[in-house]
Amino acid sequence: MTTELEQQLSTLQQQATDAIAATDTLDALDQLRVSYLGKKGQVSKILGGMGKLSPEERPRIGALANQVKTAVQAQLEQRKADLQAAQIEAQLKAETLDVTMPGVYLPQGRVHPINSIIDQISDIFVGLGYTVAEGPEIETDYYNFEALNFLPDHPARDMQDTLYLPNGQLMRTHTSNTQIRYMENHEPPLRVLATGRCYRRDTVDATHAAVFHQIEFFAVDKGITFTDLRGTIQLFLEALFGEIEVRLRPSYFPFTEPSAEVDVKWQGKWLEVLGCGMIDPNVMKAVGYDPDVYTGFAAGLGVERLAMVQHQIDDIRRLYASDLRFLRQF
Ligand code: DAH
């Protein structure tokens, strides 16, 4: 004969089975465990009624209660394992890296050949102990010409067709203005390098641009001679190009005496790349140096021309055309 307790136990087991199957979080599952198997849980409650049973019934019901308990426990554990496995699987799925996804395209930048050669030349001179200085691109007649010993109305001013501003200032025609500005504020001995843009009313062709770059270098000390200048130029050009044919030609600049121009062999022809000379005593006087005590040399390089020699570029205009097919080669 089935007792009421037996009935309750089997109903309980059925309910537990359904509830466990319907539970989909570990927390809810733990609450179920407490409510069925805990000290004050439903199985304990039913067992509490065993005192009223007859001695013959007791072992039978007791065994059944244990069976239910064990079964519910096993179901709880199985469900727990399943939920944990599902949780790990979901986490793995969420954290999966799809290595077949296309990457983010970052176009690679390049250093423009002009900036690149300026960096290289600066490194060479800094290695020789030179200081890097700067001067303004908008300049007065005094710093661009007068202090550099260009007399007013001197024909040498025609050497450099100048762009004048409405206020009487001008766009500097060369970086030699930095010589005056630097020397005015510093005492010898000094070795200085200055880079920058220059402007001229030049007709643009394969080797001339109206806006271009120069690098000026100069040194002032006691006992500096033309030999020091020659040696510096030779060392610098070899550091930049390796072996290259170089020649010095006597020339004229108002701010140097004697003066020379330096050519390098480029595509079978001589190409002028820099002007140089011993700083003229009048320039020394303009900045307050005593020309009987100090001597110095100075030089100005055409950056574009050196870049053309370095990369075998046939036309200066390519450096300013911003054609990516050209620029990507560097
Ligand atoms: N300033 C000259 C030019 O633009 C270049 C130059 C020649 C610079 C001789 C110098 C120098 O410092 O000594 O053509």
Image (cartoon, helix red, strand yellow):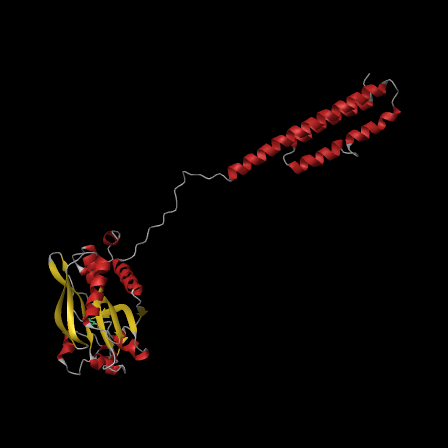
Where on the picture, by quarter, is residue 38? top right
In this rendering, position of residue 86 left or right of residue 64:
left
Vertical placement of 245 versus 50: above or below? below
Residue 216 visible at all: yes
Residue 135 visible at all: no
Which percent across, then down, holds residue 297?
22, 73
Report the residue that reaches farthest toward the top.
1
Vertical placement of 307 versus 276: above or below? above
In this rendering, position of residue 307 left or right of residue 19:
left
**For ligand 1, which image quadrant applies?**
bottom left
Vertical placement of 73 versus 173: above or below? above
Residue name at image x 14 percent, y 76 percent: 158
Residue closest to the eye, 10 or 89: 89
Residue name at image x 81 percent, y 24 percent: 5
Residue closest to the eye, 34 or 200: 200
Which percent across, then down, holds residue 59?
83, 20
**Quadrant in which the N terminus appears:** top right
